[in-house]
Image (tube, rainbow, N blue to C red):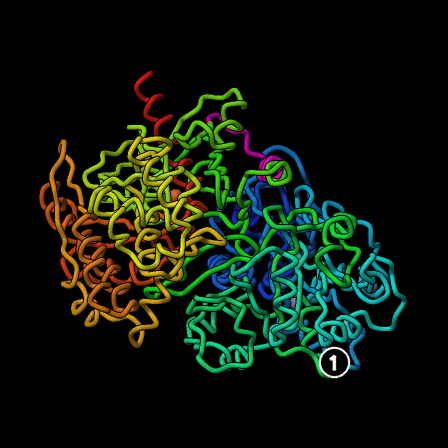
Amino acid sequence: MTVPKARPESHKEKLHIHKAAEGVQLTVKGVVQGVGFRPFVYRLAKKYSFSGTVINCDEGVVIRLSPPLCRLANFLKELQDNAPPLATISSVSEQKIFDFFSDRFVILTSESSGTVSTIIPPDVACCADCLRELTDKQDRRYQYPFINCTNCGPRFSIVESIPYDRPATSMKVFPMCPDCQKEYNDPLDRRFHAQPNACWKCGPRLSWHDEKGREIQCQNPIAEAVGALKQGKIVAIRGLGGFHLAVDATNNEAVGKLRKRKLRQSKPLAVMVADIETASEFCVVLPEEAQLLSSRQRPIVLLAKKEQNDLSPHLAPGISHLGLILPYTPFHHLLFMEPQGPKALVMTSGNRSDEPICTSNAEALDKLTDLSDCFLLHNRDIVTRVDDSLVRFAQRKVRFMRRARGYVPEAVSLDCELPEVLACGAMQKNTFCFAKGNTAYLSQHIGDLNGVENFEFYEESIQHLKDVLEITPQVVSCDLHPDYLSTHYAEGLGLPLYRVQHHHAHAVAVMAEHGLHEETCAVILDGNGYGPDGTIWGGEILLAGLTSYKRLARLERLMQPGGDAAAKEPWRMALSVLLKAYGPSVLKKYGLAHSLTKIDAHKRATLIQMMEKNVNSPLTSSCGRLFDAVAALLDVCLVSDYEGQAAMELESLALGGVQGFSLENMVRAEHRLPVVFEHMQGEMVIRSVPLIRAIVDLLDQGCDRSSLSLAFHCWLISSIAAALRELGCRHNIKNVVLSGGCLQNVILLQGLTQKLEMEGFHVFSGEKVPVNDGGISLGQAVVAGMRELEKQSLAD
Ligand code: ZN
Ligand code: ZN
Ligand code: FE
């Protein structure tokens, strides 16, 4: 930087110099680091012949421009309009600066200090430019399994600290070769400051290992892996955010072997296919779904299965949908490009059941040797474990079931200003959430907190995200449930603690996402949540505000014999509803449901006795348990192998019976089962006893199960809509939020949305965060933050 030569002094000139001496400093905040923002600014400055500097700082990207600055407004417009694909600008602030001169434009190295308001970008699927080079024989990165550039590659999964620069990532152990360094230093190159930049000469490598983990020297580990997969072997593949276990998805025996070894009888397995064309062979792929499949986030997308295909029938037994995913790392692409390569690969998470996915080679060799026949490893460390995301497209929107790779740690912007909060989340499908100001950062899917390793993953992830976001929570938030491990964790932090009822959190998560501040009717259809009255909740309509709520309606309470055991064994709930509907003598005499004869008579008798004596049979108004009861009565699922199985199979049965689900067939089905209300202690109660009696009668008459399943879904939709008609009127409310795990069910989501919209309600559900327990932490954060603000304003 140089100071321009002194100019001749005249009155006029002086004025001119004074004006020209005003430079400008622009501070750009948002996702602006590690996304090619500085080279973009460099090119833009060149275009406008501006001189000055650009630098990554803790607060974002700072641009200093020295005078003269003609057409600055145009520059600013282009800065925002043409930003690189991965950048998200949240704000640009402008400040005059004096005594700043530069004779050219330069990119300065990063500064780090103080507070952070920049965000690490999520991991990004291999881009089209890189893919072209990957297949170009002339390119120096031809078939290089770790090819990446500023627009793609690993990010969140390799970052150790901020600011996001190579020495702060797991790429620090790979010094760049002169060619890579040249690209890295060249502001006009696509790889300028691409932190994971690498090539055959200097970057990470794949290696091939036998069942004991011994390395086998070979020319091409990918060809070896493809060979093994073709022979029906299970290959443990180290990926981007963790390990996968892969088998040929067209090989029945191999899929069976994987299920047996993983002790997973029927949990749906995700399948990777080369492209949309192959995906369309196996499933119905709508244009929006194709877009999702090939998006840079590359989630697993749940798609409707086609009847005839070459895939093993054991991939998602009893379910009308299949989770498909396209390749997202360069080596996934290479697997499918191999001659004789697989058509479809099961890619299930590489873990032992109920443990987090393995990330390090040592961990995998320790834990996955019983599960896999060989290993495809690499030597780039995974700093942060992050699973594949799982979404489905429903009611014209993306719906998250698992929000992780590709999306985390993208911020969710809020319509309110919060103090710094840590929300610890629920017990299952756990995520936690940091909030600060008008942004919330939801963690990746952590999963079930039970088990030492899962809990360690939880604690480590909280610490890591806290460090990279540099948030120091002033308050914490947790579930009302006293025994959740997340509650214990929150209690141990020694900070002001706000306990949030599970379903209030479900409601506020959706309200926060859509910027709803006013009191709203919240339809919560869920598995279970701790109720303040000592019963288990999970089927309610709440009058929900951001800091408080009141229950207006609920499903009729049923006994949940055996407590948590009932959630795993739906036949228990069937017995419970029958007992309630008919009483013990009738039940014992007639049995009443054919499906239950498959359960040992002694077991049944014991359970009836248990309920009669009211032993270990808590009361529940859970919608999930009602689904369990109906699924067992219809002989869909008596004992479940994974969480939510009964409800998913019941949904599939209903979808399979008609050509998809439509409003017309809903109207036809809804009158088959009686909707009955009762008013108790100021609450509306949706009675399930008349429903159960009607189902038993229809089963007796030989009614087919799929139309009964659809009728049940429609009964629930009608009941909720009827209740809301009355409640909406009484409380003069037009906004309705739909939340809770059962609303992952497309029939319920679609049916409720359409029916309620027809009646003039504005309906909102989760689009950026899951409606299952993965969204709980966002709701907790907002409730706690708002209550803290309320408290502070009362104290003032
Ligand atoms: Zn790229
Ligand atoms: Zn290199
Ligand atoms: Fe829940």
Q: Is residue 120 above or below residue 124?
A: above
Which residue is nearer to you in this view: 494 or 160? 494
Q: Quadrant of the C terminus?
A: top left
Which residue is at 46% across, 46% downward? Answer: 774
Q: Main secondary structure of the magenta part?
A: helix
Q: Position of residue 510 (x, y in %)?
A: 34, 47
Does the image show residue 141?
A: yes
Residue 471 highlighted magenta (yes or no): yes
Residue visible at 19% across and 53% down in the picture:
693
Of residues 436 and 219, the one nearer the viewer is 219
Q: Which residue is mark 1?
A: 136
**Residue 125 inside the magenta-drawn segment:** no
Q: In the depicted view, which residue is nearer to us: 574 or 205?
A: 574
Label total for image: 1
Where is residue 583 drawn, in percent x and y?
Answer: 21, 42
Q: Is residue 8 left or right of residue 390?
A: right
Q: Position of residue 167 (x, y in %)?
A: 76, 46
631 lies above or below 274: above
**Segment tinted magenta in the rendering:** 458-475
Amino acid type, mark 1: Asp
Q: Residue at x 19, y 38 (%)?
A: 552
Q: Is residue 279 left or right of residue 338?
A: left
Direction right: furthest residue = 217
Q: Is residue 74 above or below residue 383?
A: below
Label 1 CA crowd tier, 10 Å (few <14, some 14–19, many 20+): few
Residue that lies at the very extreme toward the front in this rendered image:
589
